[in-house]
Image (tube, rainbow, N blue to C red):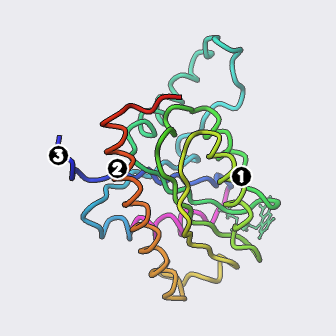
């Protein structure tokens, strides 16, 4: 396997709300990822691939049907070299379906970097991102310093799904460049020495 093999980036879209704005933000980010030669994107849309919301007892079996729901998501997280969470802010935090997706998994996050693209009302989702940093540290992930955030998200994009402020595109490039550095460094490290807790 070549050490320069494309980085696999799982983009996790955390909003599942009916009528959500999230796909506009995710599609814009996927455009940036598609233009890069060093990354391959996989959109994990938690509305399209919903996960169970009731956990089994420790060591217990999942009820029929629920293992299939997990199987639509878990291998894709395991295969990823890095993640970008696209998240809105709900009540000063991130949406419950995103926390649910995080909690169903463990090793899939270990030793991998996570970048954030956030959006919201006045806050631009920044409080959601700061909370995610704390959560993902518990899962042995590294979070990327630079983020992209959109306040007043619905007004921040034009009818073609492009941000009105070109600074957003520059910020996306910086975020993805930083993510690439960490993703290469941590993938090389995991290949040399499997992550051990
Ligand atoms: C339940 C709920 C709570 C919200 N709380 C906040 C908030 O605390 N801060 C903020 O800036 N925007 C808040 N908003 C606005 C959303 O971030 C904004 O509408 C965003 O577009 C929602 O993402 P979605 O359309 O993909 O679901 C809230 C929206 C909802 C539905």
Sooner in the amino-acid sequence: mark 3 or mark 2: 3
Residue pushed farthest left? 2
Picture residue at 44% right of the left edge, 74% below the top: 174
Separation of residues labelled 1 and 3 (CA atoms): 38 Å
Residue pushed farthest top? 60
Quadrant of image for the N terminus: top left
Whether label 1 lies within 8 Å of ligand 1 gets the answer: yes
* Residue tagged 1: 95
* Residue tagged 3: 2
Residue pushed farthest right? 91
Sooner in the amino-acid sequence: mark 1 or mark 2: 2
Asked if residue 29 is among those painted magenta in the image, a careful observer would answer yes
Sooner in the amino-acid sequence: mark 1 or mark 3: 3
Nearer mark to the viewer, of 3 and 2: 3
Q: Position of residue 139 (x, y in %)?
A: 60, 39
Picture residue at 67% right of the left edge, 53% below the top: 132
> Which quadrant of the frame does ligand 1 lie within?
bottom right
Per the rendered image, the range of residues in magenta is: 18-30
Above or below 40: residue 37: below
Quadrant of image for the C terminus: top right
* Residue tagged 2: 8
Above or below 9: residue 80: above
Above or below 132: residue 193: above
Separation of residues labelled 3 and 2 (CA atoms): 14 Å
């Amino acid at each position: 396997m070549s050490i320069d093999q494309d980085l696999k980036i799982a983009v996790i879209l955390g909003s599942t709300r009916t009528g959500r704005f999230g796909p506009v933000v995710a599609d814009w980010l996927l455009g940036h990822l598609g233009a890069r030669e060093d990354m391959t994107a996989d959109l994990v849309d938690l509305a399209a691939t919903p996960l169970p919301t009731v956990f089994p007892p420790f060591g217990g079996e999942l009820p029929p049907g629920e293992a299939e729901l997990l199987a639509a998501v878990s291998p894709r997280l395991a295969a990823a070299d890095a993640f970008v969470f696209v998240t809105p802010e709900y009540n000063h935090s991130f949406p419950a379906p995103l926390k649910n997706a995080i909690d169903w998994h463990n090793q899939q996050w270990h030793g991998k970097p996570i970048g954030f693209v956030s959006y919201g009302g006045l806050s631009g989702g920044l409080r959601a991102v700061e909370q995610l940093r704390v959560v993902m540290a518990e899962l042995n992930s590294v979070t990327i310093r630079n983020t992209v955030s959109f306040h007043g998200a619905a007004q921040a994009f034009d009818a073609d799904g492009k941000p009105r402020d070109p600074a957003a595109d520059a910020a996306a490039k910086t975020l993805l460049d930083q993510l690439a550095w960490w993703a290469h460094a941590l993938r090389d490290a995991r290949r040399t020495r499997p992550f051990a807790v």
